[in-house]
Amino acid sequence: MAMAPVAASLAMGRLKLGLPIALAMLVADQLSKWWVLRGLNLPEVRNIPLLSLGPAGLDLTMVWNRGVTFGLLWGDSFAVQLVLALAAVGIALFLLRWMARAETAWVAAALGSVIGGAVGNVIDRLRFGAVVDFVDVHLAGWHWYVFNVADAGIVCGVGMLVADALFRRDPGAK
């Protein structure tokens, strides 16, 4: 019987850590998108070189991503965008429940990063019918997929989850 208050307290602690991280990721994502759309007017400018180090570089390049990760499952219709947005909301809700039950603060933080990024991209889909991507990293003529702050948060959060799964020590192990 005494376990229920302990579990509830642990869940609140994980949410108190993960939710502010999700909110910070969401705010950073939306502010960066506002900046490239309104401040820099990147849809008209199209490309702004930021850093050039010999064959490597970093540019701001405007891309409207109507697909999911790396432009997969591309679709231009409202129905496709709505389905993708609803799928992302469903995933975010699943991750929120996982966050409340997270075994470690590390996992709660990782899930917060993923949730904040996912919600940021959902907002884009509902507002614009596409996700605003603008960070273009390139090396020797090879360009990585153009991405945004939300995508970086999702990738970093997933990387943290993978690291946790691979390297966390079992407290019961000797």
Image (tube, grey):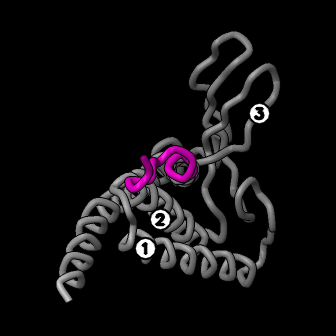
Q: Residue at x 26, y 77 (%)?
A: 7
Tag 1 residue: 96
Give the side of residue 130 with respect to residue 159, left or right. right
Q: Residue at x 50, y 59 (%)?
A: 114
Q: Relative to the observer, which residue lies in front, 98 or 96?
A: 98
Q: Position of residue 111 (x, y in %)?
A: 45, 61
Q: Secondary structure at mark 3?
A: strand
Give the side of residue 151 with respect to residue 72, left or right. left
Q: Which image quadrant for residue 110?
A: bottom left
Specify which label sits upstream in the sequence, 3 or 1: 1
Tag 3 residue: 143
Q: Relative to the observer, which residue lies in front, 143 or 155?
A: 155
Q: Which residues are magenta?
A: 162-174
Tag 2 residue: 115
Is there CB contact under 8 Å for labels 2 and 1? yes
Mark 3 vs mark 1, CA separation in Å: 33 Å
The kind of residue on which mark 1 rests is Leu
Q: Residue at x 45, y 72 (%)?
A: 98
Badge 2 density bin: few <14, some 14–19, many ≥20, Cα 10 Å = many
Q: Position of residue 145 (x, y in %)?
A: 73, 43
Please identify, in this view, whether the residue under mark 3 or under mark 1 is nearer the observer: 1
Q: Residue furthest front?
A: 174
